[in-house]
Image (cartoon, rainbow, N blue to C red):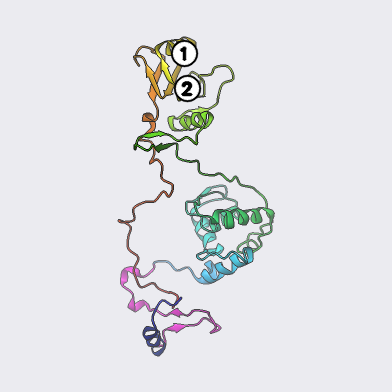
């Protein structure tokens, strides 16, 4: 794909503005731009040479070695990510990539002895990231920075899927518990949202988790009567406290000093932006990128 039409291209040819690489056989030329033509605020304060951090062309070659049949359109060179990670972290530090793409950040962080978390909602999570990291761990990925850091393989990772939204709106627009959640999933999710450690008791049905040695949580989709709450309160006793998250309760919330009563889903409505599968965000306030880049494909 060409960035300019034929008249502009011919103008660049006349002005000797096109650079076809050292060998003169680049597939696409680069457009020459000079410092004197750039606004002063765009002049870089630092310079990373291509020999040090590589370039997009090299990144595509690295991807072809890993996925000959599954190219990725916008990979980053491993040497570039090595530079960034070395400047910002030390061995053993945690590197987060919220838009993992082809998994370059995680692969480089792994080879450099960093821990990492990658997040990706696209299908290339399965087509690129997971297979790539398996090759890194098995020592089969000898491209990129592998030889420079003497990478021989090792380590591991866990692959976690994003859970469905705990709350959904019903046909009337009311927030309800997502039917995809069973009792155990609901109890574990509520423990996370309310700040408790999920640890179901084998002795007490009302003990789903704890925040301390004497503070516990009970989660149920049922409606609790005054008598049910009284019996639970007696079993909890005066030396312990219990947070009860339930659909409804038919009692004075202040009647049981060792019990705290909260209704679900009301208790967690404000804790998240619920039922968003795309996790989109507004870009209205993001800074605009200048049209003129220092180097670009013609």
The residue indicated by pointer 2 is 218
Q: Is residue 39 magenta?
A: yes
Q: Secondary structure at mark 2?
A: strand
Which residue of the protein is positioned furthest toward the front in this rendering?
Answer: 171
Residue 31 appears in the rendering: yes
| Magenta residues (range) | 16-44
Asked if disc 2 and disc 1 are in contact, CB closer than 8 Å, the reply is: yes
Q: Is residue 267 left or right of residue 125?
A: left
Q: Up-down: is 225 above or below 99?
A: above
Q: What residue is shown at x 41% (from left), y 38% (from top)?
A: 168
Q: Which residue is at the front of the view, 289 or 222?
A: 222
Q: Quadrant of residue 294?
A: bottom left
Q: Secondary structure at mark 1?
A: helix
Quadrant position of the C terminus in the picture: bottom left
- The image position of residue 252, as x and y in percent, is 34, 14
Residue 107 appears in the rendering: no
- The image position of residue 105, as x and y in percent, is 53, 56
The residue indicated by pointer 1 is 232
- The image position of residue 109, as x and y in percent, is 56, 54
- The image position of residue 179, as x and y in percent, is 47, 34
Q: Earlier in the sequence, mark 2 or mark 1?
A: 2
Q: Which residue is at the front of the view, 84 or 66?
A: 66
Q: Is residue 199 left or right of residue 247?
A: right
Q: What residue is shown at x 39% (from left), y 72% (from top)?
A: 293
Q: Is residue 132 magenta?
A: no
Which residue of the protein is positioned furthest toward the bottom in this rendering?
Answer: 14
Give the CA separation, mark 2 to mark 1. 10 Å
Q: What residue is shown at x 51% (from left), y 28% (from top)?
A: 183
Q: Up-down: is 246 above or below 43?
A: above
Dominant secondary structure of the magenta stretch? loop
Number of marks in the rendered image: 2
């Amino acid at each position: 794909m060409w960035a300019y039409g034929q008249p502009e291209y011919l103008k660049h040819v006349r002005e000797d503005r096109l650079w076809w690489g050292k060998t003169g056989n680049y597939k696409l030329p680069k457009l020459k731009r000079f410092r004197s033509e750039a606004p002063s605020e765009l002049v870089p304060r630092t310079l990373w040479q291509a020999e040090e951090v590589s370039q997009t062309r090299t990144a595509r070659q690295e991807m072809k070695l890993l996925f000959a049949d599954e190219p990725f359109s916008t990979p980053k060179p491993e040497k570039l990510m090595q530079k960034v990670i070395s400047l910002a972290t030390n061995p053993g530090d945690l590197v987060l990539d919220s838009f993992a793409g082809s998994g370059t950040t995680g692969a480089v962080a792994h080879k450099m002895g960093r821990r990492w978390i990658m997040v990706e909602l696209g299908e290339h999570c399965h087509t690129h990231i997971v297979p790539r990291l398996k090759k890194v761990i098995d020592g089969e990925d000898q491209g990129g920075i592998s030889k420079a850091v003497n990478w021989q393989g090792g380590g591991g990772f866990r692959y976690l899927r994003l859970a469905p939204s705990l709350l959904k709106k019903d046909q009337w627009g009311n927030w309800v518990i997502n039917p995809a959640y069973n009792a155990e999933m609901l109890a574990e999710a509520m423990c996370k949202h309310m700040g408790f450690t999920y640890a179901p008791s084998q002795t007490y049905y009302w003990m789903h988790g704890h925040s301390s040695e004497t503070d516990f949580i009970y989660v149920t989709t049922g409606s609790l009567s005054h008598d049910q709450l009284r019996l639970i309160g007696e079993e909890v006793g005066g030396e312990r406290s219990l947070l009860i998250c339930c659909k409804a309760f038919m009692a004075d919330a202040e009647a049981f000093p060792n019990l705290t009563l909260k209704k679900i889903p009301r208790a967690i409505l404000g804790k998240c932006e619920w039922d968003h599968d795309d996790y989109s965000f507004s870009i209205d306030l993001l800074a605009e990128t200048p049209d003129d880049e220092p180097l670009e494909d013609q």
